[in-house]
Image (cartoon, coloured by chain):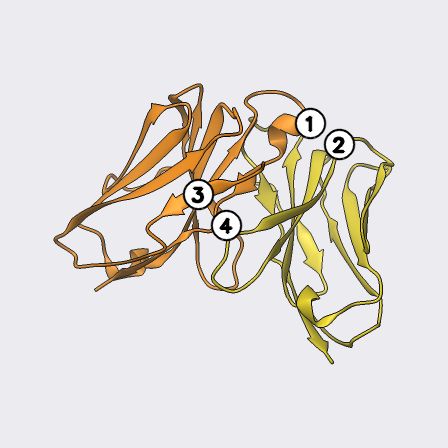
Amino acid sequence: DTEVTQTPKHLVMGMTNKKSLKCEQHMGHRAMYWYKQKAKKPPELMFVYSYEKLSINESVPSRFSPECPNSSLLNLHLHALQPEDSALYLCASSRAGTRGSGDTQYFGPGTRLTVL
Amino acid sequence: GQQLNQSPQSMFIQEGEDVSMNCTSSSIFNTWLWYKQEPGEGPVLLIALYKAGELTSNGRLTAQFGITRKDSFLNISASIPSDVGIYFCAGRAGGTSYGKLTFGQGTILTVHP
């Protein structure tokens, strides 16, 4: 099973709202990722969690707040977003810190976020 | 930062034709990955390559990890309409942290029945 699930599938929010994106995997992976993707562009890395600890933050604005409650779950809390934050948000997971297969990331279906 | 040059940017082919796309870099890569993404969905892993020279097949797809470790190609044989999508190469460059993949800009594939 190489499935990563994400909820919700679609989200529309105003600039003053607070919402959360959720991601779950049951592959025993200890690294999880958040990406942002604009139409027809490659995914852009936002955050990396390794063994439930934040290991990489790609200078993401503080209106995006990640959380890793346990090894299977990853959340992205959203607050005071801007219209330019509208995008497909992708979660991914992989084995942690091992050469080769540890680099192999499995993506979820994404959450389509629209900020009005 | 690291850059991957993926080509072609787009391809328009007839059903049944073979397809070839590639990615090149000025840096050495330790891993090469190929993904396919359909509209409104996340990227799906097609093939993962871990060793220089490695040639791996997945059905009608074949990919190779270049000997110089600076390139990789993906071939699709006998294309069918469901091959339509955007194909991304990705990899981890030597000296970069685990988890930091570099992506190519994608190849948009259109298959005419």
Numbered circle sitting on residue A100: 1
Q: Position of residue B44 (x, y in %)?
A: 60, 49
Kindly indicate whether the residue at mark 1 contacts the one at mark 2 (C-beta within 8 angstroms). yes
User: What residue is shown with label 2?
Assistant: B50
- Vertical arrangement, residue A73 with respect to residue B56, above or below: above
Quarter of the picture holding the N terminus of chain A: top right
User: What residue is shown with label 4?
Assistant: A43
Q: Residues within 10 Å of mark 1 (few under 14, many from 20)?
A: some
Question: Mark 4 belongs to which amino acid?
Answer: Pro
Cα separation, mark 1 vs mark 3, equals 24 Å
Residue at x 80%, y 31% (from the top left corner): B51
Question: Mark 1 belongs to which amino acid?
Answer: Gly
Residue at x 52%, y 26% (from the top left corner): A29
Q: Quadrant of residue A49?
A: top left
Residue A38 shows in this picture? yes
Kindly indicate whether the residue at mark 3 contacts the one at mark 1 (C-beta within 8 angstroms). no
Q: Residues within 10 Å of mark 2 (few under 14, many from 20)?
A: many
Q: Chain of mark 2?
A: B
| Left or right, A39 with reference to B71 | left
User: What residue is shown with label 3?
Assistant: A5
Choose mark 4 or mark 3, whichever is in front.
Answer: 3
Chain that is yellow in the image: B
Kindly indicate whether the residue at mark 2 contacts the one at mark 3 (C-beta within 8 angstroms). no
Q: Position of residue B31 (x, y in %)?
A: 70, 34
